[in-house]
Image (cartoon, rainbow, N blue to C red):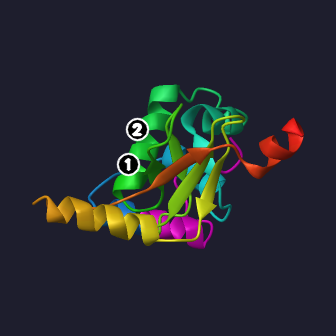
Amino acid sequence: MSGMDAPTVTGSADEQLVARLRGAGLRVTPQRLALHRLLAGTPRHVTAEALLREAAGDLPGLALPTVYSTLELFAELGLVRRVAAPGAARYDTNPSPHDHFTCTGCGALIDLDTSAGRAAATRAAEGAGHAVDAATVVVSGRCANCLASAN
């Protein structure tokens, strides 16, 4: 597994993960390190299935349930964010609060640089007497590429 047999720290992404895991009283495992390395530094939205395919070369025995549980753990630690969008669960490597657009044609998930929808949704929930922990807005429609292809 070329350097992934033992949980060694090889850079700032590993250091961040090791600190978060140890701070939560959790083990540092080769699987967690390898999956975090694949996610770190590349802004994207990934499914567990896609991440499993990427990791297969370095971790041939890795199972899909392990990838899902690791992604959920990373979400709990604030390293990724689970996006509630149609289709397979997707995890955003940008955990900061932001909204998304999902294409009903090709399935693309695209970051939106706005909080206007989130603010309105939060106000509406609080106005109805609810306590809001977090808010995410996912807008759906057809992306610019699908619209251009249709013309």
Residue depicted at x 53% and y 32%: 88
Marks 1 and 2 close (CB-CB < 8 Å): yes
What is the three-letter code of the residue carrying label 2? Answer: Ser
* Residue segment shown in magenta: 1-18
The residue positioned farthest toward the left in the image shown? 129
In the structure shown, which secondary structural element does the residue marked by tag 2 occupy? helix
The x, y position of residue 5, in whole percent, is: 59, 45
The x, y position of residue 99, in whole percent, is: 50, 61
Q: Quadrant of the N terminus?
A: top right
* Residue 22 located within the stretch drawn in magenta: no
Q: Which residue is mark 2?
A: 69
In the structure shown, which secondary structural element does the residue marked by tag 1 occupy? helix
Label 2 Cα neighbours within 10 Å, binned few <14 / some 14-19 / many ≥20: few
The x, y position of residue 17, in whole percent, is: 47, 63
User: Residue 143: which disc?
Assistant: none
Is 128 left, or right, of 134 in this rendering? left
The x, y position of residue 140, in whole percent, is: 56, 45
